Structures are given as structure tokens and as C-alpha cells.
Image (cartoon, grey):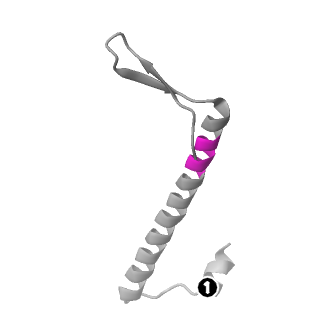
Amino acid sequence: MKIALQYVNDIHGRTQAVQLPVTEWEKVLNKLKKYEQTLKIKSDLQEAFEEVKTLQRSKSRKQTLNDFLNEL
């Protein structure tokens, strides 16, 4: 993705800001949203697998799928 960027500098020549076309900004935001959703799914799956490991090590009674569905 090639973006036409413009840099805003202060009187000393140091970059203070970056400007880009609104259409490009919207594309960046959409990609960011997709990455955040992917990261959330990955995090949720890692948490679920950790819970499964904990349950597998536990000696207490485990809830069956039928019991779980009946609670809904």
C-alpha cells in the first residue's frame, strides 16, 4: 500500500505531524480494525485453551455440554 504522505515540520525542521488523504486514512483505520479483531480472537482462543488445560488437570466434576446448554 503506497500512501501519499505529507510531513509538517516545525521551524527547526523537526517533523511534528504527518498528513495523508482521508481515503487513505479510512483504509488504514479499516486495516487496524481488522487487526484488532484478529488479535481479540487470538487472545480469546488462548484464554480458552488455558481454561481447558486447567479443567483437564482438575479432579473436580466437570460440566457436560448438555448441562451447559440447559443453563442457557
Q: Secondary structure at mark 1?
A: helix
**Residue, far top:** 11
Residue stretch rendered in magenta on the structure? 27-33
- Name the residue carrying label 1: 65
Q: Compared to 29, does 53 lie above or below?
A: below
Question: Is residue 39 within the magenta segment?
Answer: no
Farthest residue, direction left: 12
Horizontal and vertical percent for residue 21? Answer: 63, 30
Q: Main secondary structure of the magenta part?
A: helix
Question: Which residue is drawn at the image coordinates 65% and 30% (left, top)?
Answer: 22
Q: Nearer the viewer, residue 43 or 5?
A: 5
Q: Residue at x 59, y 49 (%)?
A: 31
In front of the other: 7 or 58: 7
Residue at 48% over, 86% down: 62
1 sits to left or right of 58: right
The percent position of residue 15, horizontal first and vertical second, equals 38, 23
- Residue type beneath disc 1: Leu
Q: Quadrant of the C terminus?
A: bottom right
**Label 1: few (<14), some (14–19) or many (≥20) C-alpha neighbours in 10 Å:** few
Closer to us: 25 or 5: 5
Q: Position of residue 1 (x, y in %)?
A: 58, 47
